[in-house]
Structures are given as structure tokens and as C-alpha cells.
Image (tube, rainbow, N blue to C red):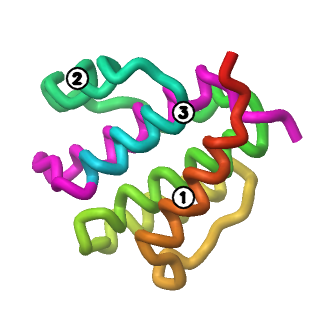
Amino acid sequence: MTEINQNDIMIIVKGATQMAQEDTTLHPKEEALLRKIIEVGGLKPEVFNDFSTSVKKEIDIFALVEMLSGEKAKKAFLLGMATMALADGTVDDHEKEFLDELGKELHVGGFKISALTYEKGESMLMHLIEVAEKS
């Protein structure tokens, strides 16, 4: 399994940002998670400003995932999306359906979002990103 690279981390941030913006409000926990992904991933802090201040625009998530480098990056992407969905404390049916569909599209298996807590998701995601290639 290939390691996660900087491009993958940027894609994870884009996907997580899209998920955070679904309800048009950036919850403090969502912002904190985005900042943590950027910091742990070794990206420049300005990346957050680029995403957080931009007007919400629809990103084709399924086109984004085509750019991921491998299975580990795809798992991190799905985990990032699920963790972001959990960050504001509510996961609606639309988000659950979307995450199920995304898991199938990525061919990395899924997980029951009801069995995942925000804290567990964040911990697992940070672990994957910490061991990423920082070149």
C-alpha cells in the first residue's frame, strides 16, 4: 500500500472542507479539524484561509477521489469525510447515504458511521496523516 503524499493530504482537506460547508456554517470543531489536518499534514497554514474564505462551491468529490494515490489515501479520505460529518454533532440521513456511496466508489469498504465517534475518527485520521510522506 502506497503512503499518503502531500497531494493526497490536499485532496483530503478539499473533501473535508466540502463536507464542512454542506450546512453553510463552519462549526468550530470542523474548523479545528481542518486546521489539524493541515498542520499534521505539513501543509502551509495559508491553505486553510484559501478554503475557509472562499465562497462555497460544489466540488465533484468523485472526481477528487480519482486523483488519490492509492488505497491508504482513499481510506484516509473516507475517514476524513466521516469525521468531518461527525464534527458538528449531527449526521443526517443525506450525509450517511453519501458516505455509504463514497465507500462503495472508493472500493475500500465502509464502516458504520454510528459506530464511529468524532474522537476516534480524528485519532485514526491523524495517525494516517502523521505517517504520510512529507515530500
Type of residue at label 3?
Answer: Gly
- Up-down: is 125 above or below 134? below
Point out residue 10 in the picture as x, y percentages from the top left corner.
50, 26
Q: Nearer the viewer, mark 1 or mark 3?
A: 3
Comes first in the chain, label 2 or label 3: 3
Q: Residue at x 54, y 58 (%)?
A: 101
Q: Residues within 10 Å of mark 1 (few under 14, many from 20)?
A: few
Residue at figure coordinates x 75%, y 45% from the top left: 72
Residue 38 image offset from top left, x and y in percent: 43, 33
- Magenta segment boundaries in residue numbering: 1-29
Kindly give the residue lying farthest to the bottom in the view shown: 115
For residue 101, the mark is 1
State the image coordinates of residue 114 (x, y, percent, origin top left).
47, 83
What amino acid type should be assigned to the residue bearing mark 1? Glu
**Label placed on residue 49:** 2
Say which residue label 3 marks.
Answer: 41
In-front residue for pair 43/70: 43
Q: Point out which mark residue 61 bears.
A: none
In this orientation, does residue 101 appear?
yes
Q: Between disc 1 and disc 3, whose residue precedes? A: 3
| Vertical position of residue 108 compared to residue 17: above or below | below
Residue displayed at 40% across by 43% down: 36
Label 3 crowd (10 A; few <14 / some 14-19 / many >=20): many
